[in-house]
Every structure is written in structure tokens, then in C-alpha cells.
Image: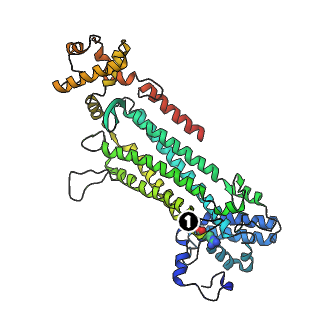
């Protein structure tokens, strides 16, 4: 097929170069945004008297026809077209003849693609955000049901201090809330309309950028035409927010993998969210969590792709930038897939509270509370710490826990101990007493859940 720019050339494009240059296989997904952007542009061209008003109306209804034909499957996208912008314009010209050729007045594909991508990502951000909200609400619900489920909290993956499963989950709710805000902030900065930047130097036509902005629902127009066509910060910011969200999902996935191992057995995944082995009949594998963890690497790769692609580009548009789409689309697709699989997996998993409690009973996770007991009775913390260390060593030697160690033995190490030590180191007490803001006590976790729900409501 003869190229649109054939006038300047003496030879046809090499078939291989045609395919190499083409982006239709991945930018076809922006057809709605492309057409809506063109409708706004044509409307403005007509209203500003740059093209004839009647012709503008014909273009608008022609574009609307193409949009509904694509939506309904009456028209399929030609894989031989160079990109979605050319396809739509060529289809319009097929339908309208010369009138169709007026659409691209005062516009370049450079500002067009910048617009399409912003519009596309604006829609995707809405969807991702609502999926993340759903996940946060699920985490809150699960936390509410498990405010009393005492488990060991870990540092260095060593049992450290008693917390509850609800408290542990609410840590993830905080991360996901920040993810939601990061996505929202990226969306706010992206909210600028680039049409009118032209190829790079704006245009001499008396266009009305404000009108196009308003028609397309943007808050501002881009402030510099070079930046308007060569900026991909919005892709990078969104990919960064998504990569961070994936990193959080990956940490949770890692914990889920650990928790459903026989060594922990803190949870059991629903059969619908686990897989078996082709050879080992006893296996129930957490493939979903592992895949989320694995896919996180891909998404981090997408962010690095975008940053590396941009880092040496002189102003303004360079064809390298066509590579932005596969990276950001992959990040968007992957995070949606992961969040929407993770949420029902969390909602359906069985929490084995007794096993958590049993694990909490071992490992001397109330040792800090034992030291605190002494401190509250006047022993300086450093001395109390040392005494407790001696007691732990004694327990290990005699096969005891702090709960089973007889009072005489306590007293033998430090006179300050009394009968009430057993209450002080009781796991329920240890958790209940940590009422500090942000702490694991049920009353504190309840407040954390309330706060997250309230912040989500405010965001609505
Ligand atoms: N397919 C191109 C892209 O995605 C559209 C912009 C083309 N501009 C150009 N000057 N060749 O970046």
C-alpha cells in the first residue's frame, strides 16, 4: 500500500521496515481514545472556522460511525495499518472522501499520541483504583475477623513479639492506601491536554485549545509545545506507582507462600485458588501468590524500560517513544490481573488461628514484656533486659517457657518477680496492653480499620 508520505519518496517502504515501524498491534487498544480525541479536535476546527462547519459535522458523525462499528465488531482494525491514528484517518477518508482528509489540520501524530495515551491511562487509572479499593476493603474485613488471632510478629523472620493477624493485615492496608494515593497523584499531574503542541512547535492556525480541553474533560492544557509532545513522565509515574503496588503485593505473596507451608500452616488457601502437582499427589501449591511475586519482576522491568528509553532522548518527539506503550500497557494489564486475583484469594482463605497461637506460644516472644514488667517495678530497662536474657537461657536449658518457669526460679534470678509476672507475660495481656496508636491491641486495630475505611470514603 502506498504510504501517506509517498510524495516525498521514490521507493516503496521495505516490507520488513513497514512491520518494524508499525505499532498497530499494540496501540489498537487506544481506538476509543483516539476517536474521541479526533471528535473534539474536529469540533473545535469547525467552531473556530478553520474548516467548514458542515464538513466538521460530517467528520464528527463519520468518526462516531467508526467508533460504533469498531465497538460492535462491524469494522475490524487492519493489522497492516501503521498505527491506530493512521487507521482511523484512512477509514474516515474511505468513508467521507476529501472531507476526511481535513481532520488532521493543525495536528500531528505527535500531539495526538500524547493525548491518546493520557486519555487511555486516565481510564485505566480509574479501573485500577477501584480494584485496589476493593482489595483494601477485603483486607479490612479480614482484619476485623482476626483482631483476636494472636500470632508471632517477626523481625529477621525470627519470632519477635506478639501481634495479631488483624494487625499484620492492616500493615498491608496502609501500603495499599498509599498506592492508591500515588496513583491518584500521578493522575492529577497527568491531567493536561497536549493537542495544539503540533509536531513540536505548535501551529499557526487559530485553534482553541481550551475548547478541546473542555470537551475532553482535562483540567489544564500543557504549557509548552515541546514538552507537550516529548513528555512521558506520566507513564513513568504511573509505572512507578504500579511497580510499588506490585512490590507490596509481592511481599504479601511471599508471606502467603510461607504461611501455607507445613512449617507455618497459618492459613489454608481455598481449593479454587491453589493448584496441585502433576507428580506429587499430596501437594497443594500457592501458585497464584508465586506468580504475583514473579510478575512483580516484569513490572519493575517495565518501569526500567521506560526510564531507560527516555534518558537519552533529545527534544522533542523521537520514534523510540513508541516503545512506551508496550511497557506501560504491560504494567497496567499485569497489576489488574494480580489485584483482581489476589482479592478473592484473600477473601476465601482459611485462617488457622490455633496454629498461629501455638506458634506464638513458642519462641519467647513475650520476653520484652517480661523485661518491661521489671522496668515498671523500678528496675532500669538495661538491667531488666539482661535478667530476662538469663531467664530465657535458663528456660532453654530446662525445657521451659517463660509461662511454665516456676516462680522460685524467677526469684532466684531477680527478687522483684512476683506471682503477677504470669499475667504480665500472658500473650493475651501482651497484645491487649499494646494499646498505643498503631499497635496490635484489638482496640487499636479497630481504630486502624475505621480510619482506613473513612479515608476510602473521603476519596470517593
Ligand atoms: N505510533 C507512533 C507512536 O506511538 C505515533 C506517533 C508517530 N509520530 C511520528 N512522528 N512518526 O509514537
* Quadrant housing the N terminus: bottom right
Q: How is the image coloured?
A: rainbow
Where in the figure is residue 296, as x and y percent of width and height?
42, 54
Q: Quadrant of the C terminus?
A: top right
Q: Nearer the viewer, residue 230 or 195?
A: 230
- Quarter-wise, where is residue 90 in the image? bottom right
Closer-to-camera residue (230/62): 230
Which image quadrant for residue 410?
top left
Task: Give whichever of 154, 458 is nearer the camera.
Answer: 154
What secondary structure is found at the residue carrying circle 1? helix
Question: Is disc 1 surrounded by few (<14), some (14 to 19) or many (20+) residues within 10 Å?
Answer: some
User: Which residue is more in the foreground, 228 or 215?
Assistant: 228
Whereabouts is ligand 1, in terms of quadrant? bottom right
Q: Position of residue 261 (x, y in %)?
A: 27, 44
Is 354 placed left or right of 202 in the picture? left
Q: Which residue is mark 1?
A: 29
In the current view of this chain or complex, which residue is farthest to the right?
49
Residue 257: % across, % down: 32, 46
| On screen, residue 180 above or below 160 | below
- On screen, residue 455 versus residue 211, left or right, reads left
Q: Position of residue 133 (x, y in %)?
A: 51, 44
Amino acid at each position: 500500500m502506498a504510504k501517506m508520505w509517498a510524495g516525498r519518496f521514490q521507493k516503496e517502504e521495505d516490507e520488513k521496515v513497514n512491520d518494524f515501524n508499525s505499532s498497530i498491534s499494540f496501540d489498537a487498544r487506544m481506538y476509543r481514545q483516539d476517536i474521541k480525541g479526533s471528535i473534539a479536535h474536529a469540533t473545535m476546527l469547525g467552531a473556530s472556522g478553520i474548516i467548514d462547519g458542515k464538513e466538521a459535522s460530517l467528520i464528527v458523525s463519520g468518526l462516531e460511525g467508526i467508533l460504533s462499528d469498531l465497538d460492535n465488531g462491524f469494522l475490524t482494525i487492519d493489522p497492516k495499518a501503521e498505527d491506530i491514528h493512521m487507521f482511523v484517518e484512512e477509514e474516515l477518508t474511505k468513508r467521507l472522501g476529501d472531507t476526511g482528509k481535513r481532520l488532521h489540520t493543525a495536528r500531528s501524530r505527535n500531539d495526538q499520541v500524547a493525548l491518546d495515551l493520557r486519555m487511555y491511562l486516565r481510564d485505566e487509572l480509574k479501573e485500577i483504583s477501584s480494584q485496589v479499593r476493593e482489595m483494601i476493603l477485603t483486607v479490612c474485613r479480614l482484619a476485623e475477623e482476626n483482631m483476636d488471632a494472636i500470632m508471632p510478629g517477626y523481625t529477621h523472620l525470627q519470632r519477635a513479639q506478639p501481634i495479631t493477624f488483624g494487625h499484620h493485615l492492616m500493615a498491608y492496608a496502609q501500603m495499599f492506601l498509599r498506592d492508591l494515593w500515588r496513583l491518584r497523584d500521578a493522575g492529577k499531574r497527568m491531567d493536561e491536554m497536549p493537542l495544539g503542541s503540533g509536531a513540536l512547535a505548535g501551529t499557526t492556525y487559530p485553534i482553541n485549545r481550551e475548547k478541546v480541553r473542555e470537551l475532553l474533560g482535562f483540567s489544564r492544557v500543557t504549557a509548552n509545545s515541546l514538552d507537550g509532545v516529548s513528555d512521558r513522565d506520566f507513564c513513568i509515574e504511573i509505572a512507578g506507582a504500579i511497580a510499588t503496588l506490585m512490590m507490596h503485593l509481592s511481599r504479601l505473596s511471599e508471606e502467603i507462600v510461607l504461611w501455607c507451608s507445613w512449617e507455618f500452616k497459618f492459613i489454608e488457601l481455598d481449593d479454587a485458588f491453589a493448584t496441585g502437582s502433576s507428580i506429587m499427589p499430596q501437594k497443594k501449591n500457592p501458585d497464584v501468590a508465586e506468580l504475583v511475586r514473579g510478575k512483580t519482576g516484569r513490572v519493575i522491568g517495565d518501569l526500567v524500560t521506560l526510564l531507560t528509553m527516555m534518558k537519552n532522548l533529545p527534544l522533542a518527539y523521537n520514534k523510540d517513544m513508541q516503545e512506551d506503550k508496550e511497557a506501560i500497557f504491560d504494567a497496567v494489564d499485569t497489576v489488574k490481573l494480580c489485584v483482581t486475583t489476589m482479592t478473592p484469594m484473600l477473601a476465601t482463605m482459611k485462617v488457622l488461628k490455633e496454629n498461629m497461637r501455638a506458634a506464638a506460644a513458642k519462641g519467647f516472644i513475650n520476653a520484652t514484656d517480661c523485661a518491661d514488667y521489671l522496668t515498671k517495678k523500678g528496675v532500669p530497662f538495661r538491667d531488666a533486659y539482661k535478667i530476662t536474657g538469663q531467664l530465657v537461657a535458663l528456660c532453654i536449658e530446662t525445657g521451659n517457657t517463660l509461662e511454665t518457669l516456676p516462680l522460685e526460679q524467677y526469684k532466684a534470678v531477680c527478687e522483684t518477680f512476683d506471682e503477677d509476672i504470669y499475667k504480665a507475660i500472658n500473650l493475651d495481656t501482651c497484645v491487649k496492653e499494646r494499646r498505643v496508636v498503631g499497635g496490635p491491641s484489638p482496640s487499636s486495630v479497630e481504630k486502624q480499620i475505621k480510619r482506613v475505611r473513612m479515608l476510602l470514603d473521603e476519596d470517593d
